Image (cartoon, rainbow, N blue to C red):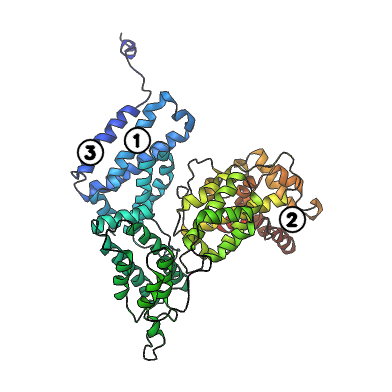
Amino acid sequence: DGNGDGDKEGWKRWANSSTGEEHIFLRCARPVVSGDAPKSTQEAVELVRVCTQWMETDMASNNAMPAQQMLEPGRTENINHALALGTLLIAVVENAQVLNVLGKASAPKGMAQQLSKTLASYVPVLLNFSPQGAARLELFRTQTLVAIEPVDSAKKDLVARPLIDDSAIFSYLHNRYQGDIQQTIIDLILASFDILANATFRNERAQTTAILRSFLINKVPLLLTTLSSSLFPPLTSEYCITEALNHVDTNAFPTLSNMFDESSNGNMFSDSVRQDFCFACCLHGLIAESSIETLLGDVPMQSLPANGRYVKEDLVQQCLSDPERAEGLIDELEHMDGNVGAVSQAITEVIGRLCNNKETMSLKGLCSQLARKPSSLDVMLLFDKPTTILQPICDLLDNWHYDDDQGEYQPVYEEFGSILLLVLSFTHRYNLSTVDLGIRTPDSFVAKLLNQGHLSRAMDELTEQEQNHLDGWIRGLFDNESGGLGDELMSSCPPQDFYLLVPTLFHHIVLACSTKNLSDDGLKGGLEYLVDTFLLPSLIPGITW
């Protein structure tokens, strides 16, 4: 009719464009994979920006829809949409032209950082649908992008951590040497000695040389054991090790006979790294003990470990039956005897079992001791991924709840805080993301603490329960007439809720001090509570606020 109502009756209202977008993503991915696109620097920049925007849009859409609903059978279009976008993203971040643009100083300021930040949030979403795709994107974010980005002077002093596991090492060695196991073994040994020598020559920190030395003595023999299984007669592991040691610089790593030679004043190491390495190889059956004297050029001054080669399973059983044994093993992480791999993996497994069994008292002691010795964390990451170590702990913290017959609450806070402190030690020392920790849901307490734990919130953003908790903590810390921090407050406020309130609590403390509503003595008295053992980890979100 004249009003156009007849035309409107034939209109079809838009409902969901997931299928159309899926086809667009897949069609766009093809030329990117083949290298036909992007054709210019500007195209590469726009492609990265559009991909970043699509990730943000997809996350906003997912946040509006519960994860369970997305995984329902009738929601296959959402899954296919996520898989197609993941395919496009992988094609883009692995494209040579895109990588070249991201690595240039002339790239738009902040583009690489924004891409990294968005990927960090998007990877956990993709993890629900495509673990392999999520892993490739996380590998790009944590390795490739870090390598090509200009060095950030504010972050250059972060402690390094192994970013690849054994399978990646063996894959690289296979591709590099095309199955030449003899040369692989020789070059691996020489490279490990050279890296340690170079670190010492550059006067690197003792912590750096210690971890490199542990890699040489405790990790390399384990890698050699796997490689040697592919050797065929007449080649033996002992022959390859002998060949490698013949090429190791005796000025940096003297033989026993050279160590006491007065004319050799340029030796970097007063003790024999060669000797430690030889005995570690002997411990793992790579060389005969009778050959060590020949390799060192004199009678050795040490012997194999008194207890022989450790077996991880035996150590785990010892630790489970005697918690003090587990804490004693932490000291052995500093040893240079070839047994540290079994020690580290045993500690990791014990942590996992204690988490599964909710034996929080024993776990508290183990986590506290590890957190007090940051160098032990470096060693553990030589043998296990952060996820393997930390995912069970994060699951425990996320699902922590009081027992029905809970009597005292301060010890619970102390156990929770000690365990949380280890997670925070790992994440802050190595700049770990929630993906590194194995966290898959944004509702995770640990994820919220890491992503938002430094942000204070306005009172109107808090729920009524959170406002009551905040009021209770302020009164408990600073109001002497309230009787201090009692079980009533802690029983109503689980540890997870307290730690998420800490930045807001510190905001109100600073506000009270600046407006003279809190005296210096009152402030001191309240802070004395926070430095007590059961609340000590709260200083971390407080300091980062």
Check the image and name the residue furthest to the top: 1
Q: Percent position (x, y) of residue 89?
A: 32, 42
Q: CA distance from mark 3 to mark 2?
A: 63 Å
Q: Percent position (x, y) of residue 62?
A: 44, 34
> Mark 1 Cα within 10 Å, few/some/many (few <14, many 20+)?
many
State which region is magenta. Answer: 304-309
Residue 31, above or below 139: above
Residue 266, above or below 204: below
Q: Amino acid at mark 3?
A: Arg
Note whether residue 109 is visible.
no
Q: Main secondary structure of the magenta part?
A: loop
Is 308 colored magenta in this rendering? Answer: yes
Q: Which residue is mark 3?
A: 30
Name the N-terminal-most of marks 3 and 2: 3
Q: Amino acid at mark 1?
A: Leu
Tally of numbered tags: 3
Q: Nearer the viewer, residue 13 or 8?
A: 13
Q: Percent position (x, y) of residue 516?
A: 70, 59
- At 53% from the left edge and 64% from the top edge, which residue is drawn? 374
> Mark 3 Cα within 10 Å, few/some/many (few <14, many 20+)?
some
Q: Percent position (x, y) of residue 21?
A: 31, 31
- At 32% from the left edge and 35% from the top edge, which residue is drawn? 84
Q: Quadrant of the C terminus?
A: bottom right
Q: Nearer the viewer, residue 216 or 67?
A: 216
Q: Which residue is mark 1?
A: 83
Q: Which residue is mark 2?
A: 478
Label 1–label 2 contact, CB within 8 A: no
Instruction: Say which mark, if any, is on residue 380.
Output: none
Label 1–label 3 contact, CB within 8 A: no
Q: Nearer the viewer, mark 3 or mark 2?
A: 3
